Amino acid sequence: MSIRLRLTIWYVGLLAIILIAFALVIYTLQERSALGEVDAELQTYAKTIVSVASRDVLIKHINGTAPSIVSRGEIAPGFTGTQLYVQFTNLWGIIGTQEPKLNETQIPLDDEMRDWANRGRATKRSIPLPNGILLRVYTEPIVLDNQVIGYIQTARVINGVSDSLRRLATLLTAGIVLALALAALVGVLLAEAALRPIDSVTQTALRITQTDDLSRRIIVPPNAPKDEVGRLAATFNLMLDRIETIFETQQRFIADVSHELRTPLTTIRGNLALVKRSKQTDPESLAAMESEAERMSRLVRDLLLLAQADAGVTLQRSPVELDGLLLDVYRQTRIIAQQTDHGVTVRLGAEDQATVMGDPDRLRQLLLNLAENAVKYTPSGGQVTLGLERQEGWVRVDVADTGIGIPAEDLPHIFERFYRVDKARSREKGGTGLGLSIAQWIAQAHGGRLEVKSRVGQGTTFSLWLPVTAGGANPPLAKELAGTPGR
Ligand code: ADP
């Protein structure tokens, strides 16, 4: 069953219950008030007759030997006696005075009414007569010397009252039916209008599935209300944005990976052909093939690591003395700098002591990535400085160089996979374009962050922030660096 139908049924059903309850209350109140008036009149009539008549006259009425009540003036003024009937009956049910005559019949007096009267109680009943007359009957005992000696009944034809009650019932029923029909119509229209955007979400989702076109969006008019359905449509569009971005990134990544792998493979195949043709091992070709094979295995290793990162692999955590680790990295960087042999000096800056919880191998890899980059992108005569400082529960490791720097427009992208400021230069230096993505993942996996400040021609500083203990506030420098790119 559709939500639209369910909503309408609920809405109309609830309204029906309320309206019917309301109508019942109105009808009952009206019935009570109409009959209450008649009952009060009948009771007063009976009591007046009994109180006015003497003992003897009452006995005569029961026996049927008394003259007319009206002619004797035994009733109070105001009672015409024409619409009101009175009947005396003895204990055995034999009728005495009956005035006026009720179309040759008598006012009904059943055993139950007699029982109540014998116990000194009055009863009020609506009794239909065979000729279609509806009679309201009041019955009470006539008591003399504490003994019930007969019964007095007063009655009135209430066909008029019941007719007007029936008219009221018909009116209420018709009103309810009309109101419910109208409510159902309005309910359907409202539900239709409210759920139309959901239909549009469904249609869009269906079309995307059928056509594989992730660029489709739900059209949300600018003046559309910001209600639940509006928010659903907006959220759905946001989700599509994300999926589209992820999909595009994924496709670009695959294209990048195949490109990155194809280049060294082409070089290797070219050199192999050369060796085959010349039938002798050319040391230059061998060196080129070795270097390309090395780059490929570095690339594959980095890709594997990123795949693990994407799969949400958790890191081994143990206390790591970061100062000792930095010293290791410093030594290794010096060796690298000497190997590259272009006169870059590597030195140590601030040397605070700090222990963090983390994976020592990954942290070493992160710092080495930064330090290797610093050496790679610093021309001869330049300097690379490694430093460690503690600040309010955080430890900051800086890798600063006096190298070529990174242009401001590239800064927001350098942590992206395969992003390089200068592709040829990076490749020539053996870079895979994945080093900073990996470094950033490791920093984040340790609850820290990686920040960068750079000026073209003057140098670059990468700062790794790690919490000294688990948790902690934002790194203080993050505020100073507000606006500095980095993710
Ligand atoms: P690569 O393997 O190309 O070095 P990375 O992910 O490590 O890849 O770095 C991405 C890009 O960021 C590099 O290609 C380079 O353009 C730039 N870069 C990284 N570190 C530095 C630095 N210290 N100085 C200047 N540019 C840098």
Image (cartoon, grey):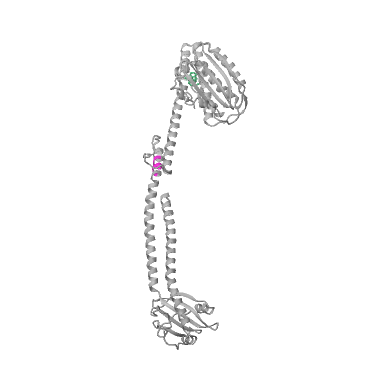
Question: Is 200 included in the stretch rendered in magenta?
Answer: yes
x, y (%) of residue 369? 53, 21
x, y (%) of residue 66? 44, 88
x, y (%) of residue 270? 45, 16
Asked whether 45 or 174 is in front, the reply is: 45
Q: Which residues are magenta?
A: 199-204
Image-quadrant location for residue 105: bottom left
Asked whether 6 or 102 is in front, the reply is: 102
* Left or right of residue 175: residue 313: right
Is 447 located above or below residue 227 in the figure? above
* Left or right of residue 393: residue 40: left
Q: Residue, x 56% and y 22% (percent of image)?
A: 397
Q: Is residue 145 among the parts visible in the rendering? A: yes
Tell me how many marks there are.
Answer: 0
Q: Is residue 281 among the parts visible in the rendering? A: no
What secondary structure is the stretch in magenta mostly built from? helix
Residue at the farthest bottom position: 65
Q: Residue, x 44% and y 21% (percent of image)?
A: 408
x, y (%) of residue 287? 51, 13
Is 174 located above or below residue 253 in the figure? below
Image-quadrant location for residue 103: bottom left
Question: Is 395 included in the stretch rendered in magenta?
Answer: no
